[in-house]
Amino acid sequence: MAKITLNKNNFFNNLDIIAKATKSVDKIAVVLKDNAYGHGLVLMATMAKEYGVKRAVVQTEDEAKEIEDFFDYILALNAIPHAKSDTIRYTINDLNSIVKFPHATKVELKVDTGMHRNGVAMDELEKAFVKIKEQGLILEGVFTHHRSADELSSEWFWQKENFKKVKEKAKILACGFGFGELRFHSSNSASLFRHVEFDEDMARVGIAVYGCMDLPLSISVDGFKPVLSLYANKISSRELQKGEKVGYGGTYTAEENCVVSNYNFGYGDGFLRGSSNNYITPHAKKLVGRISMDNSSFLSDEEEILIFDDAREMAKSAKTISYEVLTSLKPTIKREIV
Ligand SMILES: *Cc1c(COP(=O)(O)O)cnc(C)c1O
């Protein structure tokens, strides 16, 4: 199996850039869902805590429980509570789900300002407050998610305006229903950097902390460094004669006599098969033939090769996004902080 290294300096460098934009470390909520974008949940939580980050965002209650001791605040995006927790805040994604939350659960209400995926509709806001009150929940925050923060268009602006309306209405409702002061947040990585002056209570930052944000040039942000590198070890080597073929289906034909070696990283470990015959490593080793379950072949005879140190490059070869490259990496791969 392959090996993952996590570069702490790069991670802290990325957090420095983000803290400058949020103007306070306390406003950073690191998004650690999906095994911290494939980096390793507990390792990333440990480093985030060391840096001074106090907030995290995950998908499930199981993820939240695993890192409960690392943070003051954990937002679970999609979970119904099974155990009581002072740290975990649960997201209400739908009006009809409110009755499922136990009395006195700390919740945040997600509002649909245009993405039309999760959240109550803007005109359901009052209904949601009524139901939350009836259910005896503790409403702490109201938030939304942008559908196109990473695209150069007017999309981000009209969604921001919608959320502004939501905020104004929610503040009045919170007073009327006797809830405390609410926390408002709408920004993922890309959205955070669209603000000229960030003025929200928190930013939910995922891909930027991992150093793999990909934005159009005119809205791009300099200085981020990828945290994760993936290495694989040689299983075997052979000399190929010109004309011989490699791997399942023989889809690569040697253009000249060469050495090809087989490394222990395949699609069973999270190597996206769409990269087959279409990738060159940072040290110019060419991937040849089809990626198989536990193996991939490169024109190399080195014992260990760096497969990638920037998931965005890997993503191009598989015609996907860095998020998919990273979250595909199996939790069983060994990970270490360097
Ligand atoms: C995944 C997610 C984020 C983080 O998005 P990035 O683009 O990785 O910064 C933020 N908010 C919500 C609701 C998410 O689902």
Image: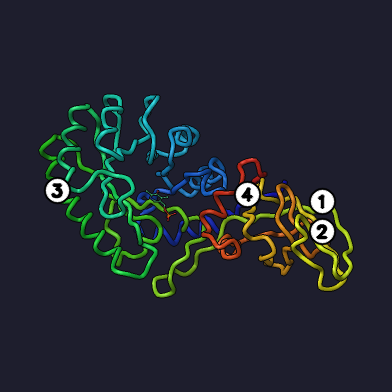
Which residue lies under the disc numbered 2? 261
Percent of width and height locating residue 48: 49, 47
User: Nearer the N terminus, badge 2 or badge 4?
Assistant: 2
User: At 55% across and 63% down in the image, what residue appears?
Assistant: 319
Q: CA distance from mark 2 to mark 4?
A: 19 Å
Q: Mark 2: which secondary structure?
A: strand
- Give the numbered dot on residue 169: 3
Residue nearest the viewer, comparing 3 with 272:
272
Q: Residues within 10 Å of mark 1 (few under 14, many from 20)?
A: some
User: Nearer the N terminus, badge 3 or badge 4?
Assistant: 3
Q: Are marks 1 and 4 in contact (CB under 8 Å)?
A: no
Q: Residue furthest bottom?
A: 218
User: At 66% across and 44% down in the image, what residue appears?
Assistant: 333
Which residue lies under the disc numbered 1? 235
Which residue lies under the disc numbered 4? 270
Q: CA distance from mark 1 to mark 4?
A: 18 Å
What amino acid is labelled 4 in the image? Gly
- In the displayed structure, 108 sits above or below 159; it is above
Q: Are marks 1 and 3 in contact (CB under 8 Å)?
A: no
User: At 76% across and 55% down in the image, what residue appears?
Assistant: 248
What amino acid is labelled 1 in the image? Ile
Q: CA distance from mark 3 to mark 4?
A: 45 Å
- In the displayed structure, 317 sits above or below 210; it is below
Q: Are marks 2 and 1 in contact (CB under 8 Å)?
A: yes
User: Nearer the N terminus, badge 1 or badge 3?
Assistant: 3
Q: How many marks?
A: 4
User: Nearer the N terminus, badge 3 or badge 2?
Assistant: 3
Residue nearest the viewer, comparing 240 with 32:
240
Disc nearest the viewer among 3 and 4:
4
Q: CA distance from mark 3 to mark 2?
A: 63 Å
Residue 194 occupies which quadrant of the picture? bottom left
